[in-house]
Image (cartoon, helix red, strand yellow):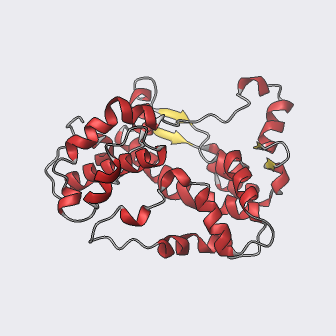
Amino acid sequence: MPKAISIVKQPFWDLHWYYLTKEMKNFTDVFLSGDGGDELFGGYTFRYKKFLELTNENSTNHEKIIAYLNCHERDWVPDQEQVFGREIKFDWNEIYKILESYFDNSLPRLTQVFLADYNGKLTYNMNPLYKLIHEHFAIQNIAPIQNEGLIQYSCTLPNDQKYDSKLNLGKIILLKLLEKYKVKNLISSNKQGFSVNTSKLWNSYGKKIFLHYFDKSRLVEDQIINSDWVQRYVSKNNLDVRYINKFLGILALEIWYRLFITKDLKSNEKL
């Protein structure tokens, strides 16, 4: 984790792309990826289904923002405002403001979700992080789906060409292409990804590493993270996965803080 964080210069813990690219370098200097396919052509079926269940045509902008956040419930915890120490003035209203423009418009509900998704993790997480990792390993990444023409084309597609709410099926137009060229058998019927089993990770060695670094946490010392909140949950058995994810995020922040702020950790150190 220290090496990966030192490359991307941001406190993210789920940097599986670093390890994938490191291994890839043994075989090639150029690769093609389908990055952007989910955001542009409707791949996040689990999110669309939940959002449409939580909202209706009469939902206010604020209600839709809350629903969208509830579709990302693994990214935050119910007592989120208690996570931070005195130096951080966490305010949910600041989060709502970031999302407001995606839902304060006349677009259909599902189109609003597509807009928020594209301008969320793809634009501000995946793409910039992947770019730094590719540059570090001197690998050229070609993402055909993200060329300007396809991005513009995806914006003109009607929603029923992206997502079928009755079947909970996404990427409709891409599936039709696979059927046309008789290669649909090459893909799984279920969405595949690089999701990490964080509960297993936490229980095997993640918790031990976290406790080691938070014995004398720089984040706690500098009142960025609330020690009382950490102690309230960290020793619990069968900890809810949302809290596990939050602890892994805080661990990444601790590593980042020691690398770039206190500078008492070297990037080549192993956890």
Q: Residue at x 72, y 49 (%)?
A: 42
Q: Position of residue 89 (x, y in %)?
A: 35, 74
Q: Position of residue 270 (x, y in %)?
A: 23, 34
Can you tell which quarter of the image residue 151 is in?
bottom right
Q: Position of residue 174 (x, y in %)?
A: 77, 40
Image quadrant where one finds the C terminus: top left
Residue found at the very far left of the displayed protein? 264
- In the displayed structure, does residue 13 sit left or right of residue 111? left
Q: Residue at x 28, y 66 (%)?
A: 85
Residue 12 appears in the picture as rendered? no
Q: As displayed, is residue 168 above or below residue 108?
A: above
Image quadrant where one finds the N terminus: top left
| Nearer to us in this view, 159 or 183 | 159
Q: As displayed, is residue 20 above or below residue 76?
A: above
| Nearer to us in this view, 121 or 226 | 226
Q: Residue at x 26, y 38 (%)?
A: 209
Q: Position of residue 203 (x, y in %)?
A: 37, 32
| Nearer to us in this view, 33 or 96 | 96
| Nearer to us in this view, 4 or 242 | 242
Q: As displayed, is residue 49 above or below residue 156?
A: above
